[in-house]
Image (cartoon, coloured by chain):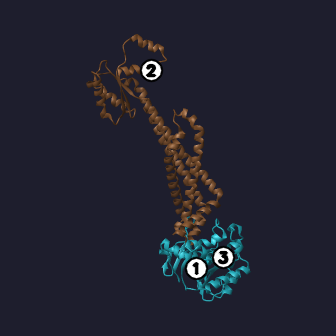
Amino acid sequence: MLTSLKRILKFSWIGFLRNKALVLEVIFVITISMSLITSLFLSQGVSEFLINYLQDKADISVYFKQNTSEQDIVGVEEALYQFSNEIESVEYVSQEKALQIFTETHKNDPESLQALEEVGDNPFLPSLVIKARDPIYYVQISNYLSQDSFKDVIDKIPYYDNKRVVDRLSAITDGIKKFTIGMGLILGLLAVFITFNTIRLTISASKDEISTMRLVGASNWFIKGPFIIQGILYGVISILIVDILFFILLMFFSPRLQVFFSGFNLLNYFRTEYGSLFLIQIIFVGIVSIVSTLLALNKHLKI
Amino acid sequence: MILFQNVTKIYHSELSPNHIPALNDISFKIEPKEFLSIVGRSGAGKTTLIKLLIGEEDITKGNIFFRNENIKETKFNELQKIRRKIGVVYQDYRLLFSKTVYENISYIMEVMGFSDKEISKSVSQVLEIVGLQDKTRSFPKELSGGEQQRLAIARALVHKPDLVIADEPTGNLDPYNTFEIINLFKKINESGATVILATHDRRVIDNLNKRVITLEEGKLVRDEKSGKFIL
């Protein structure tokens, strides 16, 4: 058993070293397919970031009537607990805090500050700023708060004014999700197709030798083993090339892309998520190489 | 040792509706340690007969037994074990072109699990016998036709098989080498192995003075204990 394994490894290595041109061609093609997988992984990270970023920008404010007691406001906040699956956060902004935020935001805008001074009193209403887990939940939350039971305390919910913006945001995030999934499927299938065909062609080139090996009495694993190990070697070398290449490219281009991607740092993402990426690459190469090799070999193992 | 029992082989062609049998109801027996020559014109069925014996082609009708094992019903693993007991010199050599001369010969012994030391010793011996001792690191494509044929012979003999089958083993050899190789087969036969030799070469058959089976258009037309080349 151990002798056979040693010999299978020897055959793999000798085959790998002797067919340099073929090995380079195969590694080149698998490198392209691994680049597709890696790009897909990075684009998935970018799209996730962009979706969160856009969703983070959306919220609704529920304005309470002047002189609504803090107890009533807390009551409304507690009533929203039933939406714990839909709501990410609820923040209470008192009249004083609203004024403070306005002053802070407009400190370089003397006209606004003067207008505020002319009003005299604090004109701001207390409010709850609600952030949903997904923009689609805003309708549901707004409808709930528009019930008669809240009429005495709630002054206005300007959701319906912002509805168009929220709907557009939903459409954009939905579009990004669909695009990522669609591209993932296309690129993933393309990568599988390229790798499978390359390995199949490599094995087809050895079909006469495979028949001869069968006729001299070699067991299936004695024949299959070297091809499987060579397939894995092609994959591992391709992964190393792709990862080093992407790291170098991201070092140069990540700062420029960061501006384009609303602050998303691709190099940091590549570094922090490298474990998952490597695992995906290894699983992809392992499964595709082994399955392709076995399928291609079985075709020639019929004697 | 080997029994052919009413063996028929028909090749089905998609282009022709008439299926002409390559072998037609062949029956004969080969005893252990026998030296049997099979003669016949091209297309008589010599190579098909060998292919059926080693399980390379399926039998259409009849049975072939190798040491009481029916080749048709043998499972793959068992068939591989049988193949390891047979050394075949193919008409088209069937060499492993990505392997060196040494590796082509050692492969069968590696398959059988011999130690590296035993392999090295046996390969060196057989290389010397076929005169390829200076070509160990060459690849088959770097050899002449005659050298490739001798390499195929070396591969068939290195693991000292119980049965040696040679399909036109002297086709590319000059008269001197032909004589040497036939003598080698005779020696192997004397040491206990069964030998089946399929050939066109009248001189080889006439000098052997061994059993000869003659095939004509897939039929066995003659089986003589001490036969001559008659077509």
Which chain is in brown here?
Answer: A
Circle 3 Cα neighbour tier, 10 Å, few/some/many (<14 / 14–19 / ≥20): some
Tell me the chain of label 1. Answer: B
Type of residue at label 2? Answer: Glu
Type of residue at label 3? Answer: Ser
Residue at numbered disc 1: B161
Residue A130 in the figure: left or right of residue B189: left
Residue at numbered disc 2: A104
In contact (CB < 8 Å): disc 1 and disc 2: no
Q: Calculate the distance from the C-alpha at mark 1 to the C-alpha at mark 3.
A: 17 Å
Circle 2 Cα neighbour tier, 10 Å, few/some/many (<14 / 14–19 / ≥20): few
- Identify the residue at horizontal 55%, vertical 75% (top origin): B84
In contact (CB < 8 Å): disc 2 and disc 3: no
Q: Is A73 placed above or below B144 here?
A: above
- Identify the residue at horizontal 73%, vertical 78% (top origin): B174
Q: Position of residue B23 (x, y in %)?
A: 56, 76
Residue B220 in the figure: left or right of residue A93: right
On the rendered image, what quadrant is the C terminus of chain B found in?
bottom right
Q: Is A175 placed above or below A280 here?
A: above
In contact (CB < 8 Å): disc 1 and disc 3: no
Q: Say which element carries label 3.
A: helix
Q: Is A285 placed above or below B83 here?
A: above
Type of residue at label 1? Answer: Pro
Give chain B's shade: cyan
Residue at numbered disc 3: B124
Front: mark 1 or 2: 2
